[in-house]
Image (spheres, grey):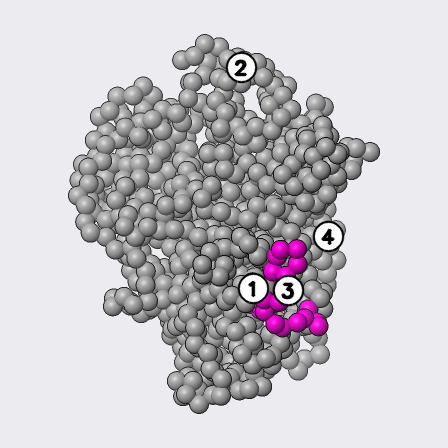
Amino acid sequence: MTDTDMTGTDMTPALAPHAIGRDLARRDGAAKVRGTAFYADESPVENPVYCRIVASTIARGRAVSVDTGEAEGLDGVLAVLTPATAERLASTSDAELAVLQDDRVGFRGQIVGAVVAESFEVARDAAARVRVEYEVAAHDAALSADRDDLYTPDQVNPTYETDTAQGDMAAAMASAPVTLERTYTTPMLHNNPMEPHATTALWEPDRGAGALTLYDSTQGVHPVRSTVAAVLGLDEDQVRVVCPYVGGGFGSKGMPHANTVLAAMAARAVPGRPVRVALTRQQMFSLAGYRTPTIQQVQLAAQRDGALDGIAIDVVEQTSRIKEFAEQTGVPTRNMYAAPNRRTTHRLAALDVPVPSWMRAPGECPGMFGPEVALDELAAELGMDPVELRIRNEPDVDPETGKPFSTRNLVACLRRGAEQFGWPGRDPRPGVRLEGGWWIGTGVASATYPVYRMPVSTAVIGYSGGRYVARIGAADIGTGAWTVLPQIAADALGVPVQEVEVLIGDTEYPPASVAGGSSGTTTWGSALVAAAEQFRGKFGADPHEGDEIEASVPENAASERFAMHAYGAHFAEVAVHADTGEVRVPRLHGTFAAGRIVNPRLARSQLLGGMTMGLGMALMEDSVLDPRTGHVVNHDLAEYHVATNADVADLRADWVHEDDPHVNPMGSKGIGEIGIVGTAAAVANAAWHATGVRVRDLPLTLDKVLPPA
Amino acid sequence: MDPDTTLRVDGVTHHLDLDPRASLLDTLRQRLGVMSPKKGCDHGQCGACTVLVDGRRVLACLSLAVAQDGHEITTADGLSEDGADHPVHRAFVEEDALQCGYCTPGQVCSAVGALDEFARGWPSAVTTDVAADPELDDAEIAERMSGNLCRCGAYKGIRAAVADAHREVSR
Ligand code: FES
Ligand code: FES
């Protein structure tokens, strides 16, 4: 491949696009529209039994006795697992996965028992008859920035420095002609994929290799295998994980959670019988991860012409006392805009709450809310157009590292997006457009997301029956990998895409990284390209039946020399009802710069999907954790509102052409997450423009935009 | 156990001894192995379990199986008698009205039901003149399809697909 630096002459990605860039329909579409593509809870097994969780009703303490007598008396009950009777796990170092290993309760909704029964109805009935006696301890589930026990984590997700500083931010705040200091908050948010986390587990002890089969709803079969094998004390080859289709995840299925381990334990309690464990929607709010609430104190110091002297974000957020997850909310501020003085910090409160985890664009998504609203406030203060203010602060190089960007087209996104949205000529005054009983306004925000390449992924390519068949244990969580990976492999092999099949979603195929960090296409695609090149090198253009070769994702030397990110610009039109305060979003537009787009039809779906989730975040999503009980009180889809069809009006996603020779042979950047990143800020900024009311706390519910009574 | 219940599912007749507590959804999935309808919430909040009962949209998770004795159940996999693709199937693939696919069979059944309701002249909450024949515009489709959540956010494609299918079936 070519990996020339900025002075080189070859400035296009290595792979000549033929199948890449084509608007192909989803290969798994036909099965999915009929419902025949199988998910974990409907995997093809004989005579399954059903496992139902008993969840703690206290937030902290001990489950001192678990009385199973009545449950065990029911016809059809096969096993009841309690802290006293469950098998001892080999590794309990991850407290979230140490299911039923002792009687301690660390958060409300934690697993304190489980019932396995011949039918779902009996399992549910029996679980309700398990009597748990608790020794209640005082719990603490209230996040605030004033707590005196906030602590500094060693690093933030995945491995970023916790705090950074450049120049002297305090001095910039003291001396700049215009300064702004505001606090913004984002609430606890739940991924809520439509498919609840589920596992079907089968334990066949006599089989040796593959003794434990897990049909798991996961973003990565190989990471699940290595985790579960270690927790159970099995060899990796004793565990097979299968997951051809995933009903969404958005990060929550990126790391195995307690349900997967419980399924394995339940299966080992009834050898030879496949056990199905599916979380209920309610259980999803305590056992499947979530986005921490964030409190963001943002400081901006600026010259009158809009040039930033300084930008800072100090973040307070929560983790669970039993396991740390530190969201990297301050990270995007490190390299988004030019400013000589800069500070980012993260402080955590360890609470008696469920374990937070990845949710679509961890870090970037919440972390672009505060700063992007702050910039809008600054633009208003300076009397400057908010698009121009952002362009005014465009850096030449990565302000944090001094490295050049491999490509950076934020300005192109802002300009083109503004044009497409109809931004030029916008009246900047807030609260002056009343049309048919609705206040109308428009807003803008930027978006960014890093280019990640995972270190481990291997692809096998073989020639069989006149076709090329590649195998890689990757995942399609709705992203389109079933369709896009063949496009990449076809171009790397130099054959039509119909001649290529790529098999994914099974640990029988070579190791692949998790579908996370928008890294799938870069990582797995690079492995496929490497395998294709070696295949051609060894077998030429005319291979024989059975020829096969394996290759792994290479390291990218260019990542040492360049900062690599995708960018985007979001534009929103908001209407706020003059009497009721109802907030609607008649138009939402995103223009993105994310390298070469491998499949426009599927890419657009990804971007629109991210924006739609961002719309939910802006307007309605809010997990209400009652600190008195440690319980998310709105723990279902009737009360935790996600955007539905009629919430989404005129929604558009577009992209600028971008040739990036440095990111990977395809020239692609990840697109699964960037769509959500700037949406909420753009909507909040538009709501201010509509009403003159500045909302700094998501979601933008009507009580916040109505004038005080 | 209750006496015999007869369910017709995608054209096949089943005589079943049912637990009276069993929902139609669990009966389809767990007793009959009919996995097309999905379980997103089990509480009537998401639409993933939508099937057609005698041609009308029903949430299978909120319906007891014994109450469907003698009725004709159609899932997204049984929409065409000859097993061919239904126009709604084709439109969903063409418009990429799905990503993960988990809400999709419910969306497809809901779309078929909604198009039938529309053809019968039923108004929706956004129909301005309930006496006139409604126009199937974008707002009508969005309203009629809002009982089906899609966390992947395929709504725009879903609306386009329903409009395409409507054009095809009413041609
Ligand atoms: S599963 Fe029936 S409405 Fe959600
Ligand atoms: S396609 Fe994933 S929930 Fe609709």
Residue A258 placed where, x, y %?
Answer: 35, 45
- Residue A618 x %, y %: 52, 57
Q: Amino acid at mark 3?
A: Arg
Depth check, mark 1 against mark 2: the one in front is 1
Q: CA distance from mark 3 to mark 4?
A: 40 Å
What amino acid is found at the position of numbered circle 1 in the picture? Thr
- Residue A433's tag is 3
Structural crowding at the residue carrying mark 1, measured as other residues with C-alpha within 10 Å and reported as few (<14), some (14–19) or many (≥20): many
| Tag 4: amino acid | Asp
* Label 2: how many Cα within 10 Å (few below 14, some 14–19, many 20+): some
Mark before the other along the chain sequence, 1 or 3 = 3
The answer to whether any part of residue A324 appears in the image is no
Q: Which residue is mark 2?
A: B69
Residue density around tag 4, few if under 14, some if 14–19, many if 20 or more, within 10 Å: some
Kindly indicate whether the residues beneath marks 1 and 3 are on one polypeptide chain. Answer: yes
- Residue that appears at 54% across and 32% down: B49
Marked residue nearer the N-terminal end (3 or 4): 4
Asked if badge 2 and badge 3 are on a common chain, one would say no
Q: Position of residue A364 (x, y in %)?
A: 49, 65
Confirm whether circles 3 and 4 share one chain.
Answer: yes
**Which chain does the numbered disc 1 sit on?**
A
Badge 3 element: loop
Left or right position of A705 against A34: left
The image shows residue A68 at horizontal and vertical percentages of 23, 29
Q: Chain of mark 2?
A: B
Q: Given contact means CB atoms under 8 Å apart, are the residues at marks 1 and 2 in contact?
A: no
| Residue situated furthest front in the rendering | A709
Q: Name the front one of labels 2 and 4.
A: 2
**Is B6 displayed left or right of B141 in the figure?**
left
Nearer mark to the viewer, of 3 and 4: 3
User: Where is mark 1, residue-wise?
Assistant: A691
Q: Which residues are magenta?
A: A423-451
